[in-house]
Image (cartoon, rainbow, N blue to C red):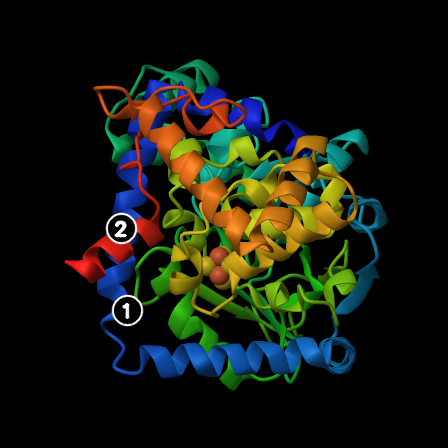
Amino acid sequence: MQIQSMHFKARAGQKLADERLQQTLKKFSTKFVGARASAITELDDFEATRDAAVERRMRAIENLDVWLATFEKEATRRGATVLYAETAEQASKLVVEIAKKHDVKKVIKSKSMVSEEMALNKALEAAGVTPVETDLGEYILQINDNEPPSHIIAPVIHKDKEEVADLFAKVHNKPRLTDIHEMTREAREVLRPHFLSADMGVTGGNFIVAESGSVAVVTNEGNEGMCTIMPPKVHVVVTGIEKVLPTLSDLATVMRLLPRSATGQSISNYFSLLTGPRASDEQDGPEHMYFVLVDAGRTGLIGTEFQEMLRCIRCGACMNHCPVYSKIGGHAYGWVYPGPMGSVLTPSYIGVDKAMDLPQASTLCGECHVVCPVKIPLPDLLRKLREKQFEKGLRPGFEYLAFGIWSFVAQRPALYRIAMRVAARALSAMGGTRRMISKLPMAGGWTDYRDMPAPSGKTFRELYRERKRS
Ligand code: SF4
């Protein structure tokens, strides 16, 4: 996937002007928010479960090498092959090599954000292997010119039913349907022969479990089972190294939070815990099972102030509740991970200098921290990224000048009082009789799309003194 994170502002502007997208986003974001709010009330011990999940995720991350070694030992003991990739490109190469080794012509895939990081479909196609996405949302994107997902759990959230109906009629070359059930049935009819004829299945892994060498895969469509249990003789799991959990009990704890935080479900429709290839006395399952565990920037976060980001369980709650994401959708962020988690992950993985606007793409309202099931302090991390950019000299010159002046004035109380008084009077005068400011010199971003209410003309100190006197 091409990195477009440097064009956030321009892309956000385009998305805001897209009325159809605005309507679609409004419908979906309120749906997820409401569903989560009611799902968490089912747990009497929701806060305690969150604390336990934080503790268990951090136990894994703080000793990542130990738990990965345990996972490798247990998975290998059960017949799987565990491979490591330092970069996303290496990971793609490994999957292509596995495909070649087993003479694979067609790969069926269930949804995996790590495979988006790896640009896996492109790599497979270049090697003469046909990848077929089987998650309905991902399938829609694939037949629409390999469009990237715009949400980590609802990849096609930016499209309405009518758009999908047009696309199906065009690509499937069938009469246009508008009933969602009929459309889904049509997609199943198209996908079924692929399930039956594929040689290899690729899935992500929501978690891998060290004590049993298993992978846990969560879906709502059951396609993960079709990708791993039906004909494919090879199953490849691609996932990030940080997804390891020490025990099955840890998995049970985080699974109480994941579907509730993601889609507001008590449990997802399908949940597979897959351990090793098919044994001689088993009827289902692949003959060969591989794990490709991807680093691609993750170890760079260990031991740093951004380490907490690694405990993310990819539920998407932070983006569902984010006032910025819910206005612009995921494509504006320009890489695999959108919303608040993406604004931290993208600069952390690809470099702060390659995602200049993302740490600024937040109101810092704090809602993402409030809803994050594993309590990642996203606003704090965004602020730290801003500091990093500032310290590295990456911000525009006027910011340094402005903060330099601010710092000088703020350290001199008498000067600060005078400056505030002048600013309050000036801003009040700019409001005119309408009491609204429609253009702010040197801070046009605040007034480009709406007017700013003019302040009263007095500083807080002046108002406070007046009230005290009265
Ligand atoms: S940062 Fe938290 S809320 Fe956002 S996707 Fe990760 S776990 Fe979910």
Query: In terms of image quadrants, where is residue 359?
Result: top right
Q: Which residue is drawn at 72% across and 81% down?
A: 63
Q: Quadrant of residue 270?
A: bottom left
Instruction: Looking at the picture, tell me which residue is in the foreground, 176 or 443.
Output: 443
Residue corresponding to mark 1: 40
Disc 2 marks which amino acid?
Leu
Residue density around tag 1, few if under 14, some if 14–19, many if 20 or more, within 10 Å: some
Q: Can residue 116 be seen in this view?
A: no
Whole-number angstrom distance, CA of label 2 to CA of label 1: 43 Å
**Residue that label 2 marks:** 463
**Observer-nearest of 82 and 78:** 82
Q: Quadrant of residue 42?
A: bottom left
Q: What amino acid is found at the position of numbered circle 1 in the picture?
A: Ile
Tell me the element at label 2. Answer: helix
Rendering coords of residue 37 (x, y %): 25, 61
Q: Look at the image and tell me in which quarter the C terminus lies.
A: bottom left
Query: Residue drawn at (39%, 80%), measured in percent from left and top?
Result: 49
Kind of element beneath mark 1: helix
